[in-house]
Amino acid sequence: MDTIPSSITAGDVIKSATTNAILNILKAIVPVATPISASGDLDDTAMFLIVDATAGEVDLNLPLATDSGKWYLVAKGDSSGNSVKVLPQAGDNISGGDNWTMSAQYNLVLLVADGVHTWLRITSV
């Protein structure tokens, strides 16, 4: 049986819990998951996104990483072969990379801004 860690810190990767268990925990913590199916810019109106890429690839543009502690949880909810790509603004990065791409159903990523130029990938499945 999978176990859920009692605490999570920056840089931890949760390997023992299944993706569905993580999603269920986060749904309990974050009251509203926002469905999205089109490319666009992320803002303060939604921070927990479940993406449906059935109609085609979805590109999500992060705001600047200057707001320390700001976070986004992005999950791919569909089983299509289309990808969901999370992109930082010019001059920013995602844990050193230029994007984060999810291609399988239930893939997810939790990103937190460092307040300078980096979106820290806290966990991904």
Image: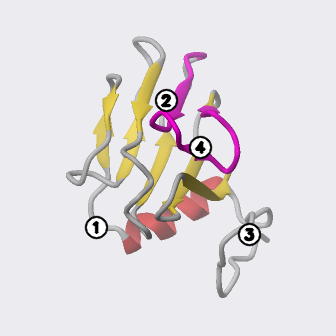
Of residues 55 and 118, which is closer to you in this image? 118
Determine if the magenta segment contains residue 50: no
Secondary-structure class at tag 1? loop
Left or right, 59 with respect to 34, comes to right
Task: Give the Cα distance between marks 2 and 4.
Answer: 26 Å
Q: What x and y, as percent, mark residue 99?
A: 60, 34
Q: Residues within 10 Å of mark 2 (few under 14, many from 20)?
A: some
Q: Which residue is mark 3?
A: 12
Q: Which mark is residue 31?
A: 1
* Residue type for callout 3: Asp
Which residue is the site of mark 2?
78
- Label 1 crowd (10 A; few <14 / some 14-19 / many >=20): few
For the record, the magenta segment spans: 81-101
Mark 1 or mark 2, which is nearer the start of the sequence? 1
Q: Closer to the camera: disc 3 or disc 4?
A: 4
Query: Quarter of the image containing the N terminus?
Result: bottom right
Check disc 3: other Cα within 10 Å, few if <14, some if 14-19, many if 20+. few
Say which of marks 4 and 1 sits in front. Answer: 4
Residue 115 picture location, percent across and down: 46, 64
Q: Is residue 89 magenta?
A: yes
Instruction: Using the image, determine if residue 51 lies above or below residue 6.
Output: above
User: Residue under circle 4?
Assistant: 93
Q: As shown in the figure, which amino acid type bears the numbered disc 1?
A: Pro
